[in-house]
Structure formats: C-alpha cells, structure tokens
Image (tube, helix red, strand yellow):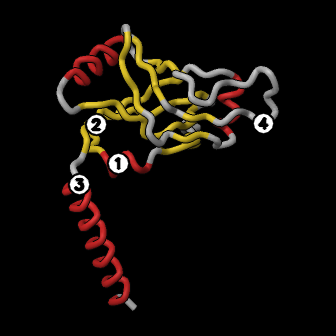
Amino acid sequence: MKDEIKIACENRKARHDYFIHETYEAGIELKGTEVKSLRAGKANLRDSYAEVKDGEVFVEHFHISPYEQGNIFNHEPLRRRRLLLHKREILKLFGKTREKGFTLIPLKVYFKRGRAKLELALASGKHNYDKRAALHEKSAKRDVERALKERSR
C-alpha cells in the first residue's frame, strides 16, 4: 500500500511571498487534542515561521484551534511546537538561517502513515516586483490556455 497523505492545512501564501530553495519533512510534537483538531482540519499556517534554538527547531504562530470535545485537557492554540528533524538537518538549517535573507517557513501539515508531518521550506523573501512578475506570468499562462481551449472547439 502506498503512503497515503492527507493534507490537514496548507500555507498557499508562502509560495507567493517567498522563493523556496529547499524543503524538509519534519515530524511535529503534538498533544492529543491538537492531533484531533488537525484531523478535523482546524489549523492555520498563515504568519507562522520556524526557528532553531539550542539545537532544536520550533514552529511559532502555528494556530491549531481548540478541540471542541476537549474539556480541561485542551491545548493553547498558539503554543510553540517542537519539530522533529535529524541532527544533521538541524545543523544545516542553523547554518543556512544565519545567512542573510534566509528563513524557515512551514508550507503544509499532513498525515503520513497516521503521523503528523510538516513540510518546512528554506526560503528567502520576494520583493514586490518579483510578486508582480509572477502574477503577470501566471496571467499570461492562463490566457494561453484559454486561447488553446477555444481553438480546439
């Protein structure tokens, strides 16, 4: 059986705001009610980022809504969550983020073989003119597709 992947949430704006250089798959250290909320799709990656501190990687501002049936054992929605990566990967990310302009951005959270995973990207910010160029290119591509579709009728 193939690795079935169920996407819980995605940060679509990240690809618009950043150039993605490398991606990493990381496990997330979660509490029980967080997992249940993620499975229900009640999470938001907007404005979240990751940072390396004391040899560990943490994701900040990752909002997971409280679980509705989770009485007193519910979690704090914006708590700092540790990411699970190999030591070599952490050291590499630490070195890269010390370079000017690089940051760690979560792209999506998904379940793979029942475990919550986070796709982490090493990214650098886009300027406004880069964003405009990308939108122009996307628009031109859409126009070409539309013209080809009309021609084939």
Q: Residue shown at 52%/22% (left/top)? A: 80
Which tag, 4 or 1, sits closer to the chain's start? 1
Which tag, 2 or 4, sits closer to the chain's start? 4
The CA span between labels 3 and 2 is 16 Å
Split into 4 quadrants, where in the image is the N terminus?
top right
The CA span between labels 1 and 2 is 9 Å
Residue to which mark 3 is pinned: 128
Q: Residue shown at 30%/71% (left/top)? A: 139
Foreground tag (3 vs 2): 3
Place residue 151 in its image quadrant. bottom left
Which tag, 3 or 1, sits closer to the chain's start? 1
Amino acid type for the residue under numbered disc 3 = Asn
Q: Estimate the x, y position of residue 113 in percent, counting from the top left.
A: 59, 31
Residue to which mark 2 is pinned: 123
Residue to which mark 4 is pinned: 68
Place residue 77 in its image quadrant. top right
Foreground tag (3 vs 1): 3
Query: Where residue 15 is drawn, which disc sits there?
Result: 1
